[in-house]
Image (tube, helix red, strand yellow):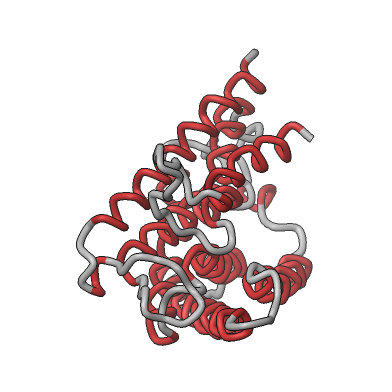
Amino acid sequence: MWFTRRMLSLSTPLWRIGFLPRMDGSRLGVHDFAGGGPVHLLGGTNALIGILFIGPRTGYFKRRKNRQDFAPASPASTLFGLFMLWWGWIGFNCGSTFGITGSKWIVATRASIITINASAAGGATALFYTLRKTKGKQVRVHHIVNGILGALVATSPTCAVVHTWEALIIGVIGALVSNLGNTFVKRFRIDDPVGAVGVHMGGGIWGLLAVGLFADGSLPGVDVMDGLFRGGGFKLLGLQVLAIVSISAWSLATVTPFYYF
């Protein structure tokens, strides 16, 4: 209930009023179509704070400990969970139109294609990543799963305002951000058992930034400024960065007392 109320208190200003309303009632213009910020970035930041408080699993970073003791118990169950999330992602990305009347069906169709394209590109990238990491000897399920999920997270803010071919770029980078992010976190001896920081925090940050880069305000059914690569300058990108900083600060301010006090 605590975390649900916090997400709702953040999502209301971000979605209903476009984030940080001006005195005249107009909006700043931050765009997040399906929750890359108040769902994934917020959740990933919460996870990082919780991980730092709880600490690593006993013996996880001890060299003498058998690493197989911490291996995933069921790769098949992991993949099954991935496919459940994968299909669900299409539903809530498309469903964020809240209807199919007028031009909403066009936005929903675009969102579905963006979601599939990005996740496919993310999965292919994750396959190359895991083969490179293992020197072609093994395909590690968690690399594939986190790569696909990182790409899907990145589609949440972007799926309504980018073109279908741009989804491939977003998915590739999303997969790399999630896997490299989890590796980066581990180097600081931070134990993230399911890769939540790389996938949700990393993917959420990348997705919000991608809006500022690729957004096309001329697409039917959307109200968004043009991104940097569309000739819109740095305004939208700067607003997306402001959203990232604000959401992260909100998480830090509200979750830290929950764990530490």
84 or 166, which lies in front?
Answer: 166
114 or 51, which lies in front?
Answer: 114
Is residue 13 shown left or right of residue 132?
Answer: right
- Tell me what residue is drawn at x 52 percent, y 51 percent: 37
- Tell me what residue is drawn at x 20 percent, y 62 percent: 233
Q: How many labels does the image show?
A: 0
Indicate the quadrant where residue 244 lies: top left
Does any portion of residue 64 appear in the rendered image? no
- Give the position of the C terminus as an image quadrant: top right
Is residue 135 shown left or right of residue 75?
Answer: left
Indicate the quadrant where residue 135 lies: bottom left
Is residue 9 shown left or right of residue 248?
Answer: right
189 or 7, which lies in front?
Answer: 7
Give percent across and percent down for residue 185. 45, 44
Give percent across and percent down for residue 115. 56, 77
Residue that sits furthest to the top in the current view: 261
Is residue 10 shown left or right of residue 189?
Answer: right
- Tell me what residue is drawn at x 43 percent, y 53 percent: 205
Does any portion of residue 128 appear in the rendered image? yes
> Would you place residue 46 above or below residue 19 in this image?
above
Give percent across and percent down for residue 234. 22, 57
52 or 3, which lies in front?
Answer: 3
- Give the position of the N terminus as an image quadrant: top right
Give percent across and percent down for residue 193. 63, 47
> Would you place residue 165 above or below residue 96 in this image?
below
Indicate the quadrant where residue 228 lies: bottom left
- Tell me what residue is drawn at x 65 percent, y 22 percent: 259
